[in-house]
Image (spheres, grey):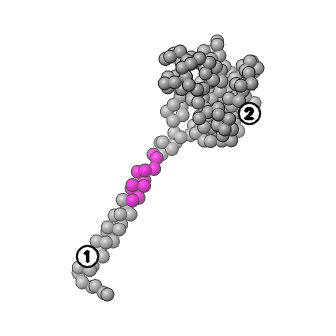
Amino acid sequence: MKDNSRRGFMGKAFGGVAAVGAVASLFAMKKSWDPLPSVKAAGFTTLDMSGYKENELVTEKWRGKPIFVLKYTSEMIAAMDESQKPRIISVGEASYLVTLGLCTHLGCIPSYEKDNKSFLCACHGGTYDIVGNVTKSPPPRALDIPPFTIKGNTLVLGEVGPEYLEMKKNGLTL
C-alpha cells in the first residue's frame, strides 16, 4: 500500500525524528549511569613500596579512606608469633602492614604507638597489635585489609590479586 499523501510523509518524518530522539535519550541515560572518570581513577591507588621507612607509619588515601602502610623491621617480624605472620604483605624483600586505617568498631582513626608497636583507638579504648589484630575490645574484628595486587615493587590498591584472595580465603579480611 503506497501512501504518497502529505499526511503519510508527515507520519514517516515524525516517526524518524522520534526514533532518533529515543536513541539519543537512551545513549544519554546510559552515559549518566556510568561512573565519572574521577570516580574510576579513584578506584585504584598505586603505591611504590621502595620509599617507605622501617617502623614509620605512613597514611595513604584510597577511595577517600585512610590506608595505613607500615614497613616492618626484622626485629618486629622476629617478635611476631605464628598467628600474626599470615597478615604480613611481602613486596620484594620487605614486609609491610597495609590496612584500612579505620577502627572496625565505629570508624574512628586509630593512632600508631611507635614505642608499643600497637594501634590505639582513642574513641573507646580499643587496641590493635602490630599486624592489626584486636588486643582489647570493643572492636569486633581486626583492621580490614583493602583489596590489593602486587606488581613488581608496587602495590595496587583496589585491584584483587592472588595474595589478597588467599588472605580472604583464610578469613584474614572481609
Q: Residue at x 58, y 39 (%)?
A: 158
Question: Measured from the top left, where is residue 162 in percent x and y?
Answer: 68, 41
**Image quadrant of residue 170?**
top right
Location of residue 4 in the rendering, given as x and y in whole percent from the top left corner: 27, 85
* The N terminus - image quarter: bottom left
Indicate whether residue 15 is drawn in magenta: no
Q: Which residue is mark 2?
A: 92
Residue stretch rendered in magenta on the structure: 26-36
Residue displayed at 45% across by 46% down: 36
Q: In the image, is residue 117 above or below residue 34?
A: above
Q: Is residue 4 visible?
A: yes
Viewed as shown, does residue 31 lie left or right of 140?
A: left
* For residue 136, above or below residue 46: above
The tag earlier along the polypeptide, 2 or 1, is 1
Q: Quadrant of residue 73?
A: top right
Q: Nearer the viewer, residue 170 or 61?
A: 170
Which residue: 28% across, 71% down?
A: 14
Numbered tag placed on residue 10 in the rendering? 1
Packing grade of label 1 (10 A; few <14, some 14-19, many >=20) is few
Q: Is residue 14 above or below residue 28?
A: below
- Residue at 49%, 33% in the rendered image: 64
Let me know if residue 48 appears in the view: no
Percent across and percent down for residue 100 are: 57, 29
Q: x, y (%) of residue 138?
A: 54, 20
Mark 1 residue element: helix
